[in-house]
Structures are given as C-alpha cells and as structure tokens.
Amino acid sequence: MKIEQSTKKSDDKLARYLSKDLHAVNNLIKQRMASKYAPRIPEVTAHLIGAGGKRLRPMLTLAAARLCGYEGPFHIHLAATVEFIHTATLLHDDVVDESPRRRGKPTANLLWDNKSSVLVGDYLFSRSFQLMVETGSLRVLDILANASATIAEGEVLQLTAAQDLATTEEIYLQVVRGKTAALFSAAAQVGGVIAGVSVSQEQALYDFGDALGIAFQIVDDLLDYTGQADTIGKNIGNDFRERKLTLPVIKAVALATEAERAFWHRTIAQGQQSEDDLDQALAIMQSHLTLEAAKNDALAWVAQAKAALVHLPPHALRVMLENLADYVVERIS
C-alpha cells in the first residue's frame, strides 16, 4: 500500500502541533520517575521511555483535551499518567514474553534482570495513580483504574489462549481490547472528561480510541510477519516463534487443510519448530489471503474510528486524528 503524502507521518504532524504540551509531559515524567533511594528506577525507566517511542497514547490525551477546548494544567498530568501505565505494561510484557529487543534496543530485563523490570513496572503503576489523583477527578480515576485492570485482564487472557488452536477471532478481539485498546480508549476519553465534554462526546472519544487501538494492534501483528526488523524495532516472526495466535494465524487455522492444521499443531500447539517453518507459515497465510483479510479488518476499524470523530467539534486536531487513524494502517507497505 502506498502511503499518501496527506497522512504520511501523521504522528509527527500531531507531535509538532502538541510540541509545547509534550515538552511539559516529558518534564513531568522525568520529575516523577525519579527516586531518592533507588537509582535503578530512573535508570530502567529512562532506558525504555527514551528508546524512541512515539508517545502516541499521551498525544491522544493531549489532543482530546485541546480539541474539546481545555485550557487548564491537568491534561499534562493525565498524559504522563497514560505514558507511565504504558511503560509499566511494556516492562512486564517483556518479562512474560522473554523478549530480547524493544524499539530496536535490548529490553530492560535483558540489561538488568526480570526482578528489576517487574518492580520498576510496579513503581510506575503507583506513580501513575498518584498523578491521576492530583487532577481531583473521580471520573478520571475511575476510567484509568478500570483501564489498568482491563489491561492486566487482557494479558492473562492472552496467556491462557496462547498455543490453543481453538482460539477464535472473538477471543482475539477480547485480548486486543484488553491489552491494547483499553489504554487507547481511556487516553482519549480522559482528555474529554477533563475538558468537561458531554456524555455523547465522551463516548465518541472512547469509541475513537477503542477502534484505533484495535486497528493499531492488528497492524502490529501483521508487521510481525511483513515488516522490516530495522523499521519495527524487533525481529520478524517473533510472534510465530513465541507461538502467539494473532489474527492472520487464527484466520489461517480456520481455513486450514488437514496437512496445514497438522503444521499449526506442531509449530504452535506443540512448539516444535524448525528453521524453515516461518517461511511455510507465511506461505500458508498467503495462500489463504489471511494477511490481506487481517489488513481489511484493520481498515474497517480505522473507518469506525474516523466515524466516531464526526461527533466532536470541528478543529484542526480532529483532522489530524483522522489522518492519524489512516496512518496506523498505512504503516503496512
């Protein structure tokens, strides 16, 4: 898919528009990740936060607040909260997945150890709750606390569904809504809440973040099979080697011949993989057009995200969020 110039690097355009707010968020993050007694906390946190992430989730909070006319200081607190929650989940995920790379760099658990990653993640979760409490909004606290619980629930569901060839697209969607979309939707929603929007506009922001997060995860799953290692910051085929049932594989299993099902049983269910199995997995998915089908699903979720924005005020930021939704899928070349 060719990337159109109108939406190319839409995350960069949004970051430039929000640059002053993002600078304030980064300063607040640096302040709050400090520890008087445990210097390893800022060391581990800085390694991950400074590794080149897009700050996409905090930008959703900032953009939603500005789009809805907010002029106060607490959107900065909420954006930092969202980034802390996200960073904490990444630290925990890399331990669970035993990942060696994150954003093109060695993971914190590889550079330090699993104990440090888990405990620093716990610290960041605690810091995030301190920040959200400072806004004085019980509604904000309710939304972000629920999102944190949903993220953990999604990760556990993924763990229990892993290597189970009976996993359906419905279960996959539940996992994605938990581990990824929950923070996207909460990030956008709290930006509106802090601005005092109507119930319908708050719902529109939630719906936008939910659909965007689902599309984002589907695309990430596709990039694991079709991307470039130097671009996506991890090795191609990691999901296959880790025996994760992502959407293109789930679709391929559903359409599998008897021989293909035996292949998936050996490689995913039993974990018996040889050097050429990734190429065979790709060939099977291509033969059933499941990579294309998954991309079409992502496009449908992007359309839902853009449709939700219609209920929000006309604004340059609304156009940027529409373009951002398109760019999420256009990461697939």
Image (cartoon, helix red, strand yellow):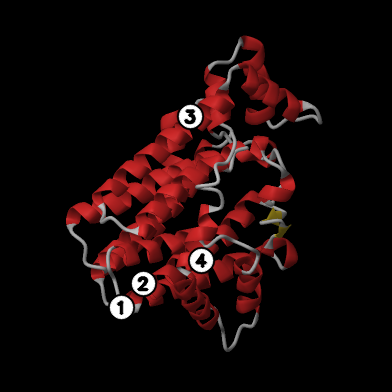
Q: Residue at x 35, y 39 (%)?
A: 304
Mark 3 and mark 1 lie on one chain; the one further toward the N terminus is 1
Q: CA distance from mark 4 to mark 3?
A: 30 Å
Q: CA distance from mark 4 to mark 2?
A: 17 Å
Residue 272, placed above or below residue 41: above
Q: Secondary structure at mark 3?
A: helix
Pointer 3 residue: 296
Residues marked 1 and 4 touching at CB (< 8 Å): no
Q: Give the residue type that dot 4 points to.
A: Arg
**Horizontal side, residue 126 vs residue 67: left or right:** right
Q: Give the residue type that dot 1 points to.
A: Gly
Residue, far front: 5
Mark 4 and mark 3 lie on one chain; the one further toward the N terminus is 4
Q: CA distance from mark 2 to mark 1?
A: 7 Å
Q: Nearer the viewer, residue 119 or 308?
A: 308
From the top left corner, tell me how far across and down residue 240 is, in percent.
66, 35
Mark 3 crowdedness (10 Å alpha carbons): few <14, some 14-19, many ≥20: some
**Horizontal side, residue 115 vs residue 329: left or right:** right
Residue 62, placed above or below residue 231: below
Q: Give the residue type that dot 3 points to.
A: Asn
Q: Residue at x 63, y 66 (%)?
A: 48
From the top left corner, tell me how far across and down residue 75 is, in percent.
36, 72
Q: Secondary structure at mark 1?
A: loop
Mark linked to residue 75:
2
Q: CA distance from mark 1 to mark 4?
A: 20 Å
Mark linked to residue 16:
4
Report which quarter residue 281 is drawn in: top right
Mark linked to residue 72:
1
